[in-house]
Amino acid sequence: MDMLLLYALSFIVSAAVSLTAGFILVPMLRRMKAGQIIREDGPVWHNKKQGTPTMGGIMFIAGITVACLSVGILEMLEGRFGHITVLTLAIVFAAIGFVDDYVKLKKKQNLGLSAKGKFLLQLLAALGFVAIMHVAGNLTTYLYIPYIDISFDIPIPVYYLFASFVIVGTVNSVNITDGVDGLLTGVTIPVTLCILALAYYWGHMSVGIFAAAMLGGLAMFLVFNFHPAKIFMGDTGSLFIGGAVCALAFAMDVPLLLIVLGFVYLIEALSDIIQIFYYKITKGKRVFKMAPIHHHFELCGFSEYKLFALFTLVSAVFAVIAFFGVYDR
């Protein structure tokens, strides 16, 4: 089957399932009183979002899963499981996020799993993914350097540690980005488009099936998540997205491209780290009005519409830069 047709089919199936799931899930979560607990140290005007249904990431997870298992069946019959490997890591991270969301709802506060517990689970998931990919022959220990087009081999233990650090760090950076209606979804769509374009250009049909499905699922989730949001994705959704983005980058053998491709995620995480570090060493002073940086922009007067537009545009620019930096590898 033609590659573009297969990608279009994956997008459509995922979009249709995600949209249908959304119309079922939103009222269901409302009846279950599965409402978001707003963090106490966030902007005060976010308090009005208290009670908005959370764990909405289940919508696009369902759509992506159905698309991968149905549209990707021919790839599996021919022994290519790239889309399933990516899906597996993303679902493992989603499961961690689901437990975190459930604990928050159970406790009725914005604190779920302990930081140490969450980190350990994420580290084990990352190490397992890297090990399986490497043993299956789908991942080498050659590290590709984008833009200068060179690769060098590094020892297996070092590569495992490096890969795990990249995955856990990226997943948590993605999670931090999810703080304003539609923001993470908008930022991730250009990231996914870039990977889809590379998959098409390089002939990675299996990986492209997942990327197309993810694009369809996120596009339909945005229907419900755009400001004012009718549902939040929760850690269930944000950790799935983080795991998916990482798995796609490693499946395409361009993990370092995440520095450029995930520029917005990186800046969000760095703003948080800088704020905490500066606050501690100066005993109370701050670099930003509030961290992560999207809250700083909010306090500077940016509406959630403007924030969505700005961050999505920045993500799109860096996605283009990322694509043209490696497409002719």
Image (cartoon, rainbow, N blue to C red):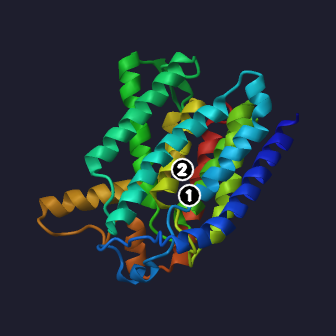
Q: Determine the image quadrant of residue 224.
A: bottom right
Q: Determine the image quadrant of residue 206.
A: top right
- Distance from the alpha carbon under mark 2 to that under mark 1: 9 Å
How far across and down, in percent of the image, does residue 134 sit? 51, 20
Depth-wise, is mark 2 or mark 1 nearer the camera? 1
**Does the residue at mark 2 contact the one at mark 1 (Cβ under 8 Å)?**
yes
Amino acid type of the residue that numbered disc 1 sits on in the rendered structure? Gly
Amino acid type of the residue that numbered disc 2 sits on in the rendered structure? Ile
Residue at 71% across, 54% down: 216
Q: Quadrant of the C terminus?
A: top right
Q: Is residue 252 visible?
A: no
Residue at 60% across, 47% down: 321
Count residues near mark 2 (Cα–Cα under 10 Å), then give few for <14, some for 14-19, many for 20+.
many
Q: Is residue 206 left or right of residue 243?
A: right
How far across and down, in percent of the image, does residue 247 sit? 54, 37
The residue beneath circle 2 is 241
Give residue 173's mark: none
Q: Is residue 105 left or right of residue 130?
A: left
Count residues near mark 1 (Cα–Cα under 10 Å), then give few for <14, some for 14-19, many for 20+.
many
Q: Is residue 212 left or right of residue 321?
A: right
Secondary-structure class at tag 2: helix
